[in-house]
Amino acid sequence: MPNAASPEAVGPNDIVLFWYHASPFGRRVKAYLTLRNIEHAECLVTPILPRPAQEALGINYRRSPVMAVGRDVYLDTRLMLAKLDEIFPPSDKHPGLSAPETKGLAQLLQKLMVDVSGFREAVKQIPMNSPIAKDPKFQKDRAGFFGPEWKPDSSSRSEGIVHMRHIFDMLESLLVDGRRWIGSSEKISMADLEGVWVIDWFLGDLKGPEEYFSSKQYPLVHQWRSRYREELDAAKGRAAKPMSLQGPDAVKLISASAFTDRDMVVDAADPLRLKAGTTVELFPTDGGGFTHKDQGSLVKLSKDEIAISVQSQAGVEMRLHAPRWRFKVKEIRPNL
């Protein structure tokens, strides 16, 4: 395998990204890392469970991607990008994407694409006649993500098109004044990344129906997406290729590394009134948390972030971090 590393190697920037190429969320993080020229290692996983390397690290969380920074493991792309912003302030080596003047729009577009409807409506366009979609293992796996009622059909595809047209209308209206980038910035910004990743997947991999989403109907959105692709391709040409790790090597590398987050405080005034060391379960409430919950000792609780201490299969302490938004942390009380 090209760029393969031995388990003794030191990972670049202590970052290991677990993802698979078809994952739009994985691509979202990869695009951020590439645009900001952040070197990292990657471990490719399968689109469906099981994922032995993550299980070996003590992770039950079923979604992709997962990002380790040392032995601190981040479970949601919203938190991953925020943490990378924190670790790598803008510099000549790592050009910034976040800026005060585009922060508000970036947050709104994140909510639109992740929380409200963008991804969930786009995913309805996965061709149901494709081999993977017809695979019972894939169907069972995705039911574990979206819920047992998940049964994609032609009616849901049509509903998805209706919602996606509204999203395209909104983006087209933002671009109508001739701005090059969605936040009126001189260069590509976080607002562009937050807004374009679903659109890029929808028009590319999913081939959004031409009769509704053509360049004639939405010329500005198509041009914006093309500019994004050009920026990303140029950044790929400048960036170092990621270190490629096999699962067992990724586990050894992470297990042998140190913790990187030094701000481990449990806020005593938090509305949940949980105390440090409390045994809790942690899981997402917007998909994938139905059957895959993580349990551990609470080590961090702030307005924006939760972290719990868990044990890997080899007995090494790991910390799992998640955002407060769309994640639930709940005390586990012993049965008396």
Image (cartoon, rainbow, N blue to C red):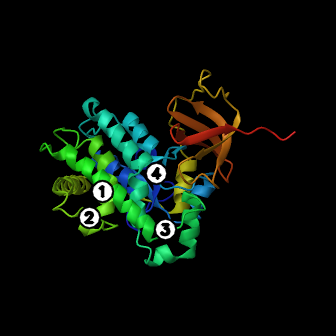
CA–CA distance between discs 2 and 1? 7 Å
Badge 3 vs badge 2, beta-carbon distance below 8 Å: no
On residue 152, which mark appears? 3
Q: Residue at image x 69%, y 48%?
A: 315
Sequence-first tag of 1 and 3: 3
Name the residue: 60% across, 21% down.
269
- Return the residue found at the far left: 178
Q: Residues within 10 Å of mark 1 (few under 14, many from 20)?
A: some
Which residue sits furthest right? Answer: 336
Residue type, numbered disc 3: Pro
User: Disc number at residue 212?
Assistant: 2
Gap between marks 1 and 3 measured at Cα: 19 Å
| Coordinates of residue 56 in the picture (x, y in percent) | 62, 56
Residue 184 position in % (x across, y down): 18, 38
Mark 4 → mark 3, Cα distance in angstroms? 33 Å
Pick the quarter of the image with the C terminus: top right
Could you say where residue 304 lies in the image, as x and y percent from the top left? 49, 32
Q: Nearer the viewer, residue 240 or 202?
A: 202
Quarter of the image where one finds residue 215 = bottom left
| Amino acid type shown at disc 4 | Val
In this picture, residue 324 sits left or right of residue 311: left
Pointer 2 with pointer 1, Cβ within 8 A:
yes
Rounded to the nearest whole Å, what is the CA distance between mark 3 and mark 2?
20 Å
Q: Badge 4 is on which residue?
A: 16
Near mark 3 (Cα within 10 A), the count class, few <14, some 14-19 or many ≥20, is: some
